[in-house]
Amino acid sequence: MPVLDLTAQVAARGFDVTLSIAEGETVAVLGPNGAGKSTLLGAIAGLLRPSGRATLGGTVLFDGSTFTPPHQRGISLLAQDALLFPHLSVLDNVAFGPRSAGRRDFRERALHWLAEVEAVHLAERRAPQLSGGQAQRVAIARALASEPRLLLLDEPMAALDVSAAPALRRLLSTVLRQRTAIIVTHEILDAYSVADRVIVMNYGHIVEQGPTREVLERPRTAFTAALAGLNLIEVGDQLGAIRPADVTISPIPTAHPGTVTDLEPHGDFVRVRSADLAADVHPRLVADLDLAPGSSVWFDFTPGRLSVYPRV
Amino acid sequence: MPSTGVPRWIVAIAALGAAFVLLPLVAMTTRIDWSQFGTLLASEESIAALLLSLRTSLLATLLCIVFGVPLALVLARTRFHGQGVLRSLVLLPLVLPPVVGGIALLYTFGRKGIVGQALDAIGIDIAFSTTAVVLAQTFVAMPFLVLSLEGALRTMGTRYEVVAATLGAGPTTVFRRVTLPLVLPALVSGTVLSFARALGEFGATLTFAGSLEGTTRTLPLEIYLQRESSPTSAVALSLVLIAVAIIVVNLAHRASRGADARA
């Protein structure tokens, strides 16, 4: 029984998405910039008026005749920036939702949710005094304190520095357990750590969707494969996926010839790309074979490393 | 100052500009007869004019807030046909000669004006009353508040308001608990500008309200009259007007800095 049922079109942006989310399910939305991920969140949160129809737990969010304003939807939105109200203390920020709902115990609710994100010690501080990671922690507490039926997260880790992200990712995977949520992200790791299901978007449409591991480990489109960092090749009438680390360049002819289009350093190895395949090879090999864009090469891999699956 | 990289010739011109504003004030104080200063100010007409000015300016400022804040909000946060025209009209008194504003008000609220006729029928006569003074001051002062507040609202953007709405706050709660506190410094400075403008208002007041002692003769009008009969007392009164203006601007500056610090 889906809790969110949505069909939305925004003609001006070429956006057309149909989506259902079950109670307690966390869905990750992946895709490049301009794919329509933010439009999707905006449509659900009520920040824009798409055509189509959406319901959340039986209430109509929008259809041809009704439009429920954002504050009556029970949907919280957590953005890239924490956007804590700068004139309020951390405690008052978190209490904002319950207080707006007319709850008398807003202080207790706020303290409860601050405890959930391990930020009680910050309660009396003002928002501008917090670090990026602390502020986002408090923003999560604030979003949860309004007890939303659906939580939307728009790249919640994108604005954080690398050192703050892991702790926040762990926190999110805890608080999102059993919670109905949609998280927009660029990071495959986010999808793995918090999502039950993945939706891949491009050009305003859903191009692929399914259980997280299924979609990311057995991509059906070149686009999803690139996102998941996998090579996608045709194996007869089936598809095969293989990691660039499991592909190498051979000095003798193989079944996979190619022309180098691009060489880029990737940590302690070099990613060699052709139109069809990418291989992560040792820099020494790049030098020995004198590889440069335009070089003809043979890719090689152990068949056992290739995961083969049907197209559909 | 040169350490900040401002060219010296610009500093020189700035100094000239500052002197141009400050010198006349200094020149005026040299003409004050300090021995009679107290008696000049204590005259019945002066005190009546000062009190009337303060009373009407405060009322006008209140009206500016009551109508100016919603106007700024509507201009900054909504989109509708004719919005550009409305904005131009609201800001028109900024560029309109005050005398012209007074004439316009006369044709609106005067006994034969389009609104005045109806009011006259139920026994309300606005022109040449203290109410007219307040209306004239509000008319010329409100654009200052609308302008500074609308600018602040646009700069602030809607990001915080969107977050507040998705946390379940209705439009009125968002306005009261998020929008207003965040633009408070601009609201304070806009209010001060309006008050200062109302306090100095002359042309529209004279045209629309006249110059009746104790009823419509505000301090600027009194100063203008005294200038003919007793220049020394005009100067003394001018100094009072300047002092009041400086005090108010200072208080407001402090208040808005306080608001900033809290934000």
Image (tube, helix red, strand yellow):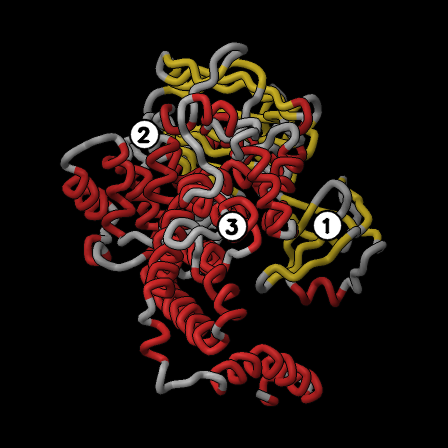
Q: Indicate the secondary structure of the residue bearing disc 2.
A: loop
Q: Could you confirm whether marks 3 and 1 are on the same chain?
A: no
Query: In the image, is residue B149 above or below residue B86?
Result: below
Q: Provide the residue designation for mark 3.
A: B205
Q: Indicate the secondary structure of the residue bearing disc 3.
A: helix
Residue type at mark 2: give it.
Pro
Chain holding disc 3: B
Q: Provide the residue designation for mark 2.
A: A148
Label 3 vs label 1, nearer the camera: 3
Whole-number angstrom distance, CA of label 2 to CA of label 1: 45 Å
Residue type at mark 3: give it.
Thr
Q: Residues within 10 Å of mark 3 (few under 14, many from 20)?
A: many
Residue A136 drawn at (x, y percent): 37, 51
Q: Residue A273 carries which label?
A: 1
Chain holding disc 1: A
Residue type at mark 1: give it.
Arg
Query: In the image, is residue A100 above or below residue A253?
Result: above
